[in-house]
Image (cartoon, coloured by chain):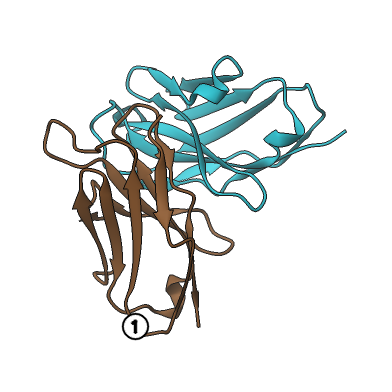
């Protein structure tokens, strides 16, 4: 199985400041079609997870443009340009290249 | 949206069958993934079933213990987990995904979760 490793695991952020989360995979997630099969999800407190980014850099419907995904191969980053209070929660990356998907361990973002 | 069945309490060794009813989209154009979250833990992907052709995949740790099925007439996906242990206590989510592996656009619609408690 592909192992996904996120860092940091905890991320305190001041509102209005940027935030960045890293995700590394044990194998390249670059598909032969040119897309990287890497998603980002946010689990807000008391809610079901929600899709933020798919195929490494494609923002899901309704996701604010302050969320941006980048990276290729084995190294990926989720950046929030200006953190808002509603962004608190646990962020997960997930690989979807192999038929057996796997999540990272999660990064907990909270407000300073 | 996808609407999941209600909470379950089971004894060790028992089985549980969870349901996930889809609405508002063409069921056969998507698949359903099952993801669980044990108390205080992260998300764990369990398996996928295609609403298009019934193909399935399971995480290795669940091979032989989990069965995924669909009923296209009622637009419902089911997951049966057998031989429950205390470690299976978790919130189980279903989430819409691709109908054919490789045509991936993320898990874009999530159910509200079903709490399964394994207790003697």
Q: Is residue A22 above or below residue B81?
A: below
Q: Is residue B75 above or below residue A81?
A: above
Q: State the hue of chain A.
A: brown
Query: Is residue B23 in view from this perspective?
Result: no
Q: Is A106 displayed left or right of A101 in the figure? A: right
Q: Residue A4: x and y, percent?
A: 40, 43
The foreground one among B91 and A72 is A72
Determine whether, in the image, residue A63 is placed left or right of residue A34.
right
Q: Residue at x 70, y 42 (%)?
A: B7
Q: Position of residue A51 (x, y in %)?
A: 36, 53
Chain assignment, label 1: A
Nearer to the camera, A104 or B96: A104
Q: Is residue B37 visible?
A: yes
Query: Is residue B105 shown above or below B63?
Result: below
Q: Secondary structure at mark 1?
A: loop
The residue tagged 1 is A17
Q: Is residue B115 left or right of residue A59?
A: right
Total numbered labels placed on residues in the image:
1
Query: Residue A90's x, y, as percent?
Result: 49, 61
In the picture, residue A2 is in which quadrant?
top left
Give the residue at the far right of this rendering.
Answer: B120
Q: Quadrant of the C terminus of chain B?
A: top right
Q: Quadrant of residue B103?
A: top left
Task: Tell me which residue sits at (42%, 38%) in the image.
Answer: A102
Say which colour chain B has: cyan
Residue B106 on image: x %, y %: 32, 44
Callout 1 crowding tier (Cα within 10 Å): few <14, some 14–19, many ≥20? few
């Amino acid at each position: 199985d592909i192992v996904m490793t996120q860092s940091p695991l905890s991320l305190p952020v001041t509102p209005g400041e940027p935030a960045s989360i890293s995700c590394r995979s044990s194998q390249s997630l670059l598909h032969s079609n040119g897309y990287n099969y890497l998603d980002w999800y946010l689990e807000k407190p008391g809610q079901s997870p929600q899709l933020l980014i798919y195929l490494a850099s494609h923002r899901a419907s309704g996701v604010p443009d302050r969320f941006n995904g980048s990276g290729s191969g084995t190294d990926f980053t989720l950046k929030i340009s200006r953190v808002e209070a509603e962004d608190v929660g646990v962020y997960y990356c997930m690989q979807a290249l192999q038929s057996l998907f796997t999540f990272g361990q999660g990064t907990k973002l909270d407000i300073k | 949206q996808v609407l999941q069945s209600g909470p379950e309490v089971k004894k060790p060794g028992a089985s549980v069958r969870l349901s996930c009813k889809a609405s508002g989209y063409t069921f056969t154009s998507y698949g359903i993934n099952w993801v669980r979250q044990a108390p205080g833990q992260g998300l764990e992907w369990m398996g996928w079933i295609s609403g298009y052709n019934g193909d399935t995949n399971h995480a290795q740790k669940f091979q032989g213990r989990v069965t995924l099925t669909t009923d296209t007439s009622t637009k419902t996906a089911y997951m049966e987990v057998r031989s429950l242990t205390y470690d299976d206590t978790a919130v189980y989510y279903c989430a819409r995904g691709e109908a054919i592996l490789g045509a991936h656009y993320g898990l874009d619609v999530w159910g509200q979760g079903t709490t399964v408690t394994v207790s003697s």
